[in-house]
Amino acid sequence: MFYGEFEHTLDRKGRLIIPSRFREAAREHYIERFFITRGLDKCLFMFAEDEWRLQEQRFKSMSFTRSEFRCFNRLYFSGACAVVPDKQARILIPYYLKEYAGIKREVYIIGVSNRIEVWNLDSWKSYYEESKGKFEEVAEKLIE
């Protein structure tokens, strides 16, 4: 559903404009509300509401008696918030999420099929440089 890479800048008020390709996908799938939370590798995960509900059900089924599950669920869900893009397709990312991801002004937004990831631009560049050489090696291990 969400594919592509886009470099963006937060506006003066700290709002993020959702890339037009993602807006089109949201319109096609009748998505009005997203949930954004702490992601892995110091980025933010942004899910359409339906996908968020699927993720929520999956993680709610984890045993709360295991410390790893409690830790993950606390950080993942406590950071989550619902966002509805305004008429100009802007969303306001809470300060604590921007702080978590190291986002100041320049961001890199990527579509990862069922989610959107929002990265600090420099963090994405570093991650990409470290990972691009492993792409084929990882593919060989994962895809048979």
Image: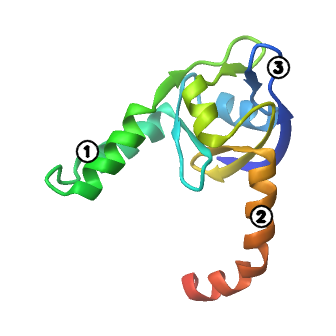
Residue pushed farthest left?
Answer: 65
Judge by depth and name the residue closer to the eye, 92 or 96: 96
The residue carrying mark 1 is: 60
Q: Nearer the viewer, mark 2 or mark 1?
A: 2
Kindly identify the amino acid type of the residue bearing the numbered disc 3: Asp
In three-dimensional space, the C-alpha distance between marks 2 and 1, rounded to whole angstroms, equals 32 Å
Compare marks 3 and 2 and give the one earlier in the sequence: 3
Compared with 14, 114 (above or below) is: below
Q: In the picture provided, is 20 more to the left or to the right than 66? A: right
**Label 1 SS:** helix
Q: Residue at x 17, y 54 (%)?
A: 63
Q: Residue at x 78, y 79 (%)?
A: 133
The circle drawn on residue 11 is 3
The residue carrying mark 2 is: 128
**Label 3 SS:** loop
In three-dimensional space, the C-alpha distance between marks 3 and 1, rounded to whole angstroms, equals 35 Å
Compare marks 2 and 1 and give the one earlier in the sequence: 1
In three-dimensional space, the C-alpha distance between marks 3 and 2, rounded to whole angstroms, equals 25 Å
Counting from the top left corner in percent of width and height, residue 143 is at 58, 83
Judge by depth and name the residue closer to the eye, 111 or 30: 111
